[in-house]
Image (spheres, coloured by chain):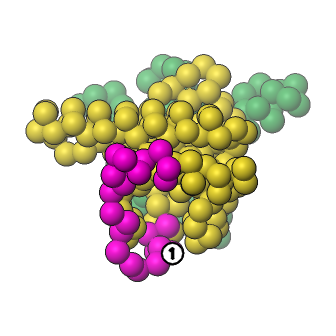
Chain colours: A green, B yellow
Amino acid sequence: MSPANAALVRVTQVPGVRGSLLISATDGLVVAERLMDGIDGRAVAALAASLVQRLSRAAIGAGMRIPTFVHLRGNEGSVLAAPGQNDLVLVALTGLDANLGLARLEMLDAVGRLN
Amino acid sequence: MRALEPWVVEPLQTFLAESSARLILLMTTSGQVVAQHGFARSFEVMTAAALGSAIVASTEELARLMGAPRFGAVVHGGSRLSCMLAAFGTPRGRWIGLVVFGPETSIGLVQLFFDRMVEELVGAAPRQAAAPPIRAENFERELNASLKELFGR
C-alpha cells in the first residue's frame, strides 16, 4: 500500500469519519481518496484547497504562522484539513458523531509521515 | 460580458463569480464565438477562438489516433496565468470553453464550476436543432458578424 493510501486508511478507520482525501493545495485536485458513496471528491478537493489557501493567506497577513490544522464545523458534520509539506493537504469529512479528537491526532500523525 | 444568445449569460456570470476566472470565451467547434468576458478587442477574440478550436481539434484527433476517448480538458499551467480549454456537448451542438485564470483561484475550482456551468447551459439551451456547420466560404462573414454583435462595432 502506498504511503498516501495508508494515511487515508488510518483516518477513515476513526469512528464517524465518512471519507478522507489527499489533495493538492495549489491546484485543488484529488491526489488520492477514500470516500463513502455519494461524496463528490472533486468538489471537496477544490473547495477545501481554496479554504486552506485563503486561511493560510489570512494567517500570514495577520502575522501568524500557516495553520497546522483546520476544523470547519457545519450543522451535519465537519470538514477537517491538515496541511502538510510538498503542497499536500489531508482532508477528512466527518459526521456529528465522529471522534474529532482521535481524527485530529490520526490526521496530524498521518500527514507528518507523508512529509 | 457579451453573448450572442441571452440564455448563456446567467450560467456564464455564475461561473465567473464562483471560479474567479479572469477571461472566458465560449465558441463552437468551428470557431464561431458564442460569448466572451474579459477580452478587450475583437482581434483578441478572433485569435483566441481560432487557436482554441484548432487545439481542441488537434487533441481530439490525437485521442482518436491513440484509440482513447476524447480528452476532457487541456490545461496549460503558468506561473502567472493558466488556461483551460474544454469541449462539451450542448443541444445546440458541440461547444468549446476557453478559460484564463490566475493564482487567486485553482484549476480544481475552475474545473468544478466549469462542469456546473456546462450542466446549466445544457439545461437552459432552447431545444432546437443545432446550427449546421459553417461552410468555408461563409466562415469569415459569420465570424465578422458575431464579432460585430459581441463588440458592437
Query: x and y percent of residue A58 in the render?
Result: 81, 35
Query: x and y percent of residue A106 in the render?
Result: 48, 39
The chain identifier of the residue carrying mark 1 reads B
Closer-to-camera residue (B8/A98):
B8
Q: Is residue B40 left or right of residue A31?
A: right
Q: Is residue B139 left or right of residue A27?
A: left
Is disc 1 placed on a helix, strand or loop? Answer: helix
Query: x and y percent of residue B127 in the render?
Result: 40, 80
Which portion, as a residue range, is magenta? B121-142
Closer-to-camera residue (A19/A55):
A55
Closer-to-camera residue (B138/B112):
B138
Report which residue position mark 1 lands on: B124
| Residue at the image position 39 percent from the left and 78 percent from the top | B128
**Is B11 placed above or below A31 here?**
below
Within the magenta stretch, is there residue B5? no
Furthest residue toward front: B137
Within the magenta stretch, is there residue B123? yes
